[in-house]
Image (cartoon, helix red, strand yellow):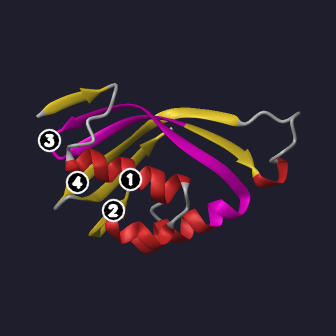
């Protein structure tokens, strides 16, 4: 099944899971909820292969990132293909040291995130930015 979304059909559990993950875990830093979104066998293929690529590695990465950078991810487009959810994204970032300084513009990064789903949860993640 292939589906491309402009306005997202959140009635699909896979889409609801991915959108919730980006909102709750990435944007709101509510890391206590991570098991609601990630499969026990989750692998993050976008993390360096020398680091932990599982849930614990992602949590370490997110906690370190939150110490230095404000970031917000917006889903611009979304498609599904079999067990994949593919998101065209825009990330807005600002160094925390620069937050509130009107002279410094946030950095805007466009790219893609691909999520592989299993049992209603995210089991794989790739980021292309």
Q: Is residue 67 magenta?
A: yes
**What residue is disc 4 on?**
117
Q: Earlier in the sequence, mark 3 or mark 4?
A: 3
Residue 24 location, x and y as percent? 46, 57
Residue 20, which numbered label?
1
Question: Residue pushed farthest left?
Answer: 1
Residue 123 location, x and y as percent? 27, 60
Q: Residues within 10 Å of mark 4 (few under 14, many from 20)?
A: many
Residue at 72% from the left image edge and 59% from the top image edge: 68
Q: Earlier in the sequence, mark 3 or mark 2?
A: 2
Q: Nearer the viewer, mark 2 or mark 1?
A: 1
Q: Is residue 127 visible?
A: yes
Span of residues in magenta? 64-90
Give the CA distance from mark 2 to mark 1. 8 Å
Q: Nearer the viewer, mark 2 or mark 4?
A: 2
Q: Residues within 10 Å of mark 3 (few under 14, many from 20)?
A: few
Q: Earlier in the sequence, mark 3 or mark 1?
A: 1
Q: Earlier in the sequence, mark 2 or mark 1?
A: 1
Give the CA distance from mark 3 to mark 2. 18 Å
**What residue is disc 3 on?**
82
Q: Nearer the viewer, mark 3 or mark 2?
A: 2
Residue 37, which numbered label?
2
Q: Is residue 37 left or right of residue 117?
A: right
Give the CA distance from mark 3 to mark 1. 19 Å
Q: Nearer the viewer, residue 111 or 46?
A: 111
């Amino acid at each position: 099944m292939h589906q491309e979304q402009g306005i997202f059909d959140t009635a699909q559990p896979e889409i609801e899971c991915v959108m919730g993950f980006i909102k709750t875990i990435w944007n709101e830093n509510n890391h206590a909820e991570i098991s609601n979104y990630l499969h026990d066998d989750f692998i993050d293929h976008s993390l360096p292969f020398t680091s932990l690529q599982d849930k614990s590695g992602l949590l370490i990465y997110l906690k370190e990132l939150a110490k230095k950078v404000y970031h917000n991810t917006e889903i611009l487009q979304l498609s599904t293909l079999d067990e994949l959810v593919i998101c065209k994204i825009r990330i807005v970032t600002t160094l925390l040291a620069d937050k509130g300084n009107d002279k410094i513009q946030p950095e805007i990064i466009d790219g893609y995130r691909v999520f592989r789903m299993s049992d209603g949860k995210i089991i794989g993640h790739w980021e292309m930015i």
